[in-house]
Structures are given as C-alpha cells and as structure tokens.
Amino acid sequence: MSVTRLPIRADLRGVHPYGAPQLDVPVLLNVNENPYPPSPAVVADIADAVAAAATGLNRYPDRDFPALRADLAAYLGAESGATGLTVDHLWAANGSNEVMLHLLQAFGGPGRTALSFAPTYSMYPEYARDTFTGWVTGRRESDFTLDLPHVRAMIAEHRPCVIFLASPNNPTGTALPIDVVEAIAGAARGAGPGGADAVVVVDEAYAEFRRTGTPSALTILPRHPHLAVSRTMSKAFALAGARVGYLAAAPDLVDALRVVRLPYHLSAVTQAVARAALRHSGSLLARVAELRDERDATVAWLRGHGLEVPGSDANFALFGTFDDRHEVWQGLLDRGVLIRATGPDGWLRVSIGTPGEMVAFRAALEEVLGW
Ligand SMILES: *Cc1c(COP(=O)(O)O)cnc(C)c1O
C-alpha cells in the first residue's frame, strides 16, 4: 500500500468538514429547519416547474437569471416594505452560504480582514479561510447586544473589507436595532482597505421570523451603497434542500459578485424550484406566523421555569445556563429529542418544531431537569 502524500494546504491539514451531527432520532430540533414540509400544492407546482425546466436541460441555464431576481425583488419589497428594489439589486446562489463566499471572493483575499462579533454564525470564519481572508472577531455584550464604541474601535483597528452582522443572530436569536446597523454602516464608510468603504453584510437568514416592530435592514439599503442584506429560502420557505440563498444590495456591489461566481452556478432546476416556491410565498409565510407563535410560547415557557432566554426574532431559542450543558443535551437525546449544544459554554439552542414536537421537547426537558 502506498502512503498518501497529497499537497493539502498547510492550514487545512487535519481539519474536519463542518456540520451538525445528523442523528436518526424522532424529534429533530437541531438545525433550525422549518418543520413543515412543502404542502401538496407547492410540491405539485415545483414538480411541474422542474418538468418544464427538464425539457431544456441540454442547454446551459440563464447565467444571470433575471426572472428569478425579479421575483426575489418583488418578494422582498412586499415582505419588508423596502422600495426601489429591482433585478439589478438582487443576487442569488446555492444557499446564502455561497452568497457570502461570493462576497469574500470579491472583497476579501490575502492581506485583507473580515470582521464579525461573537457569538455568531460558525460558518463565517470558514468563508474567510477558504478565500485566504484574515478573520477577526469582536465581542457581543453579555445580553448579546453590540456595544457601538467597541464596534467602532474594532473597525478602526482592523480596517475590514467585510463586516458580517447576523440579525437575527445565530445562535442567540437576537436582532440588531436598525439604528445600530445604520451607525455601523456609517462607521464603515472609508474604513476599509486603502480607505475604501467596508462592505457591511447583514445576514437576515431568519428575517421572516422577526417580531412585529423589528424592521429589516432592507429598509435602509438605498442610503448605503456598501450595505448588503442576505436572505435564504432555507428557513422561512421550508426549502433547505433546494439550496437557494440571495442578497440585495446596490447594483455596483452585485456586479462585483457576478465577476467571481462560477459560470452557470445556479442550475435551471434550482431556478425553477425557487420561482415555483416564491409563487406560494403567501401560504408559506402563514406557516411562519404559526412558528413565531410557537417560538414565543417556548421562550415564555423556558423563562417561566427560571431559565435565561434572550429575546428571539428567529425560529429557535437559546436557553441556559447549565453547569454541564452536554449532560442536558444528552438527556434530551436519550429521550428522542435532538437539539444543539452551540454558542457560549452553558447554553443550548432549540429550533422551533411543530406543536407536537415542542410537546415532546418540553416533556423531555421536564424529565431531564427534574421539574
Ligand atoms: C441557516 C443560516 C443561513 C442559511 O444558509 P443557507 O446556505 O442559505 O442554507 C445563513 N446564515 C445563518 C446565520 C444561518 O443560521
């Protein structure tokens, strides 16, 4: 047997692929999926759209997918109240993970630094690594808010090319007040490499779950040519398996992303699936309203038992703190409920499932904690 000596990059040697454990248990509340599969009407429309797309699969898809971008612009305008969004303001890729990779391919690179504030989404440092972009994290306060003087100091010190702000944040569920986003966008002006504006990315993967009165950063987009708001169809649209993420920003910013995308990165099948699902946004968002209510009830129930839960604008709740969170996580798993041990030590995160799944979660937690 010959010894393998692949020229693996020094910084990737011994590194394991990212991923939450995928275990086969009855109640899956670990990766913030939408628990409701697409309805029969949505499935039928997707199947028809895929069949139509299949008749043209000998050809490469539309590289710039204007029809999908127009549909996404219309959806975002209706969902957030943002005005003036057009095809040229929209971009899409295979999940918002790929959208964020495009951002760092276009604006990051060797000698540059991306900045975020922890605890936050654990994928950001991987996009930085994969694009040879430096990675720096500032801190969130103990209630997971951002301290503006600290943010300003970090921007001034590191002159980042890109600043990632997840809002609602994963894993804390907390949304940033819009005036904080606006202040950071202001601080980013001229504060990037060589005096360029740092690109401020507001990752709104969970935006549709936000509570009434929490505005989307889309509403301030027209004032900020260096702001990008990313969204996904993975969560609210119950379409995690389709891999569709997208972004809204000024047309010049979108044009920079078009340079780095692989040719034909968004398949004709993906485009057809996304457009079919968008035609059903009304019924899909009705389900989101149910999940929001279930989220609020879960937060209230956990707090009612004396646990700490940051206010959640997402489809999950972070709760704690526990001296040994692994023991609690394992106890739930032993009772058929898989949640996620993530975030700062002592905290656990539960995704919001169906009412039945949440009954199972509450019963299991009562047993584990001896309530
Ligand atoms: C789930 C999630 C995403 C979505 O990723 P996709 O690639 O679109 O599935 C993006 N950002 C955050 C913070 C998430 O939690």
Image (cartoon, rainbow, N blue to C red):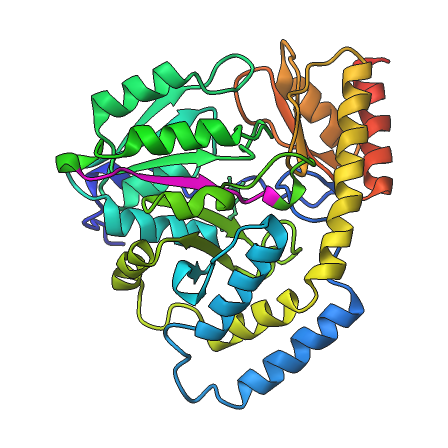
Number of numbered discs visible in the structure rendering = 0
Judge whether residue 221 is colored magenta: no
Residue interval drawn in magenta? 196-207
Relative depth, front residue between 32 and 245? 245
Residue 317 image point, x, y percent: 67, 29
- Residue at x 23% of width, y 22% of height: 156
* Quarter assignment of residue 111: top left
Horizontal side of residue 25 vs 65, given as left or right: right
Q: In which quarter of the image is the N terminus?
A: bottom left
Relative depth, front residue between 319 and 311? 311
- Residue at x 72% of width, y 31% of height: 333
Q: Is residue 149 above or below residue 182?
A: above
Q: In which quarter of the image is the C terminus?
A: top right
Residue 222 image point, x, y percent: 41, 48
Relative depth, front residue between 249 and 109? 249
**Taking the image as drawn, is residue 26 in sight?**
no
